[in-house]
Amino acid sequence: MVLRTAAAAPTTSFSTLSHLECSRDGSRHDADVVQGTSPLGAPLLARYDLQRAADTVTPAQIAARPPDLWRYHELLPVRDPAHVVTLGEGMTPLLDLPRHGTRLGVPGLRMKDEGLVPTGAFKARGAAVGISRAAELGVTGIAMPTNGNAGAAWASYAARAGMGALIAMPVDAPVITRRECVVAGAELYLVDGLIGDAGRLIAGAVARRGGFQDTSTLREPYRIEGKKTMGYEIVEQLGWRAPDVILYPTGGGVGIIAIYKALLELRELGWLSGDLPRLVAVQATGCAPIVDAFHAGHAESTAPADAHTVAFGITVPKALGDFLVLDAVRSTGGTAVAVTDEELLAAQVALARDEGTWVCPEGAACFAAVGQLRESGWLDGTEDVVVLNTGTGLIYPDTVPVDVPTLPKDGVIPG
């Protein structure tokens, strides 16, 4: 397997991608060769000619396009539409939650439900754009550590693109994500440890074998571009305006960084005015490095000694982009909140009984945080609040115990 680095001849009509920028020092880097992190080891951010984008397309024209994330293609990095790899991802519903919002004292509560995208989690967005751009740049194999959902998504999109996939995940990751990787033909290994341990194994394999691009969280520039479309969609679905508050479950932090990037781009395009939403990073008390750093006033986080939570997708002791998460939260006047496993599991059940939707435990953590923020007064109950549910609860069946009576065939249901 060979990792090629020659790009196709750039075109200008489908994407306005300009260059990559180091998130630490702002230095420019070539977007048309395969890139990892900057020379400083920092994430690279895709930058666009936003003036040209504004001159090329309008919100009304975007609204007339097919309902998927590629409707924003001028603001995505794939230059040639022939290289788009898609399973129909994007444009997930923004659901009103009247009963649950009233229960929590936040009548203007909505949920962006990412449980309906391919592979069952928002990770499909990053995989769609990351794999598409990798294919355009000639990559033939990707490798990554994962807490489960990202590996499942990247394995699936790699298969769609005819690409190889090397995946390592903790042995405690959700079993269904393991099966998703296997059925898609990925080379999968389980690690007795956390995602950082899986990352070290992948880094070693990439260096030793060659032929694979390391697509670990924020170690390639384009996963974030797929995920930022959640921000675009929220604004479009609200009539090209922003909500007052957005809550996001935060592990590696790509989602909240991406939404903040989207909001800044929309404002520069002139498609969004006024104050940006207050962004809230939500973690579990068993693994809350971002929350601890935020309240301590630190610019970066410190890994906890014993990271653990039932919300496995946010079990990330030390995120490469922690400083970007903290900047996004602080720059918007937001906050960072940690909830217990007991609180998030109770929130998961309460939401399902109020609204009929079974969210993942990571999304449930955000609903628990809404209640906490309302009780503290940080939310006064008049805000327009959007919670990101990042995946379907079906991926985590063991979070809901089932204890129901079994009747004999000739039995009678009581009552």
Image: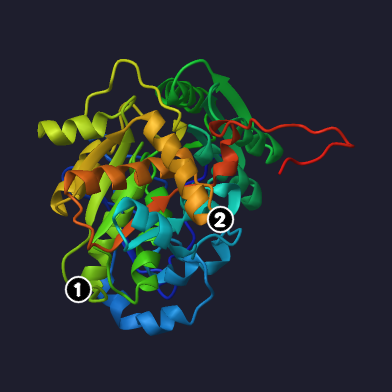
Question: Residue 204 location in percent, x, y?
Answer: 46, 21
Residue at x-position 39% and y-position 22%:
308
How many marks are shown on the rendered structure? 2
The residue that label 1 is drawn on is 273
Q: Secondary structure at mark 1?
A: loop
Residue at x-position 23% and y-position 62%:
383
Q: In the displayed structure, would residue 281 be above or below residue 70?
A: above
Q: Residues within 10 Å of mark 1 (few under 14, many from 20)?
A: some
Residue 228 location, quadrant: bottom left
Q: Is residue 161 left or right of residue 66?
A: right
* Amino acid type at mark 1: Ser
Residue 227 location, quadrant: bottom left
Q: Residues within 10 Å of mark 2 (few under 14, many from 20)?
A: some
Q: Nearer the viewer, mark 2 or mark 1?
A: 2
Disc 2/disc 1 C-alpha distance (Å): 30 Å
Q: Is residue 414 left or right of residue 63?
A: right
Question: Residue 50 location in percent, x, y?
Answer: 27, 71
Looking at the image, the residue that sits furthest to the left is: 297
Question: Residue 399 location in percent, x, y?
Answer: 53, 32
